Amino acid sequence: MGAPTNSSHCRFFDPRRGRNMLPKAPMLLMCLMLSGAAAPAAMAQDEASQAADTREVGNPVGTEREPTAIAALERMGAYLRSLTTFAVEGVGSTEESLTTGQKVMYPGTIDLLASRPNRLRANVYSTRKRREFYYDGKSLTVFAPRQGFYAEIAAPPTIKELLDKAQDRLGLVIPLSDLFELGTDPAQMARISTAFFVSTDVVGGQVCNHFAFRQPDVDWQIWIRDGAQALPCKWVITGASGDSAGLNYEMEFTWDLKPTVPANAFTFLPPTGADRIALASIKQ
């Protein structure tokens, strides 16, 4: 069996790889009658499809930075940063090329629950790796449930400061943190060489505007919900060259802007038999 062409395995669910690939700019409802539950869902999908059909399709030549595409990215980032308490689930996969040329796909999910300014929980689940992150405004705990190891460090008082410290000083990247930084750094946004509107589509029953971007070594696409709630519906990242060549990464998001938050949601309680170790020993 061939090995992946890059030594970083299952990189879609490796937060560090996920962050480096991105631009440095950037419930199931239970129903007593199942037959009755299907109709509203189908109707919602139909209505969304009809709305999308009335929209104009872009002309994806891909040679310019369209101001509307850059503005859409900045607007999405600003909306995400305006949220106080929310939950998001990302379901997706990474496709890697083996040294033999054969492609393999790895599925996985990321769940994130946040309550600004100082509460955050994130879980990463994949075939190869599981990680849980707990931040309660005072400490950050990283738990590797398969190994039964956890690490805990003192943390700054806000989520924003936590994300900065985690990456810059600890080499640790919290899942999905890139989404909230899009549009905040002009120098990073300048790395985008092309940006354009592609079309209006339906993703997960929501009408979303599809944009495509290019930067050194990476092409990426994002679908942003139409209307006042500029939430990302889906993103796709394709390694074009260099270290990312041969990698295809995609994720679809489900958002809950009014989640139920248990009192202990952000507190880590070590399970019986779990061992505390140094943070550096828990490899991402």
Image: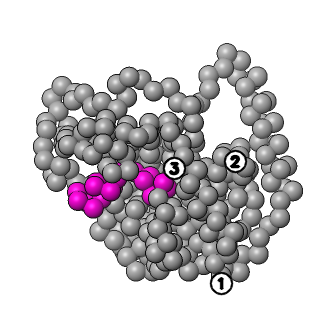
* Highlighted range, magenta: 163-180
Residue labelled with disc 2 = 228
Residue labelled with disc 1 = 63
**In the picture provided, is 279 more to the left or to the right than 186?**
left
Q: Position of residue 198 (x, y in %)?
A: 71, 68
- Work out which quarter of the rendered image holds the N terminus and state it: bottom left
Question: Element under label 2?
Answer: loop
Q: Residue at x 62, y 74 (%)?
A: 195
Quick check: is 171 in the magenta stretch?
yes
- Mark found first going from the N terminus, 2 or 3: 3
Q: Residue at x 49, y 72 (%)?
A: 186
Q: Position of residue 137 (x, y in %)?
A: 31, 38
Residue that sits furthest to the top in the current view: 32
Question: Element under label 3?
Answer: helix
Observer-nearest of 213 and 92: 213
**In the picture provided, is 180 more to the left or to the right than 65?**
left
- Mark found first going from the N terminus, 1 or 3: 1
Residue labelled with disc 3 = 81
User: Mark 2 is on which residue type?
Assistant: Ala
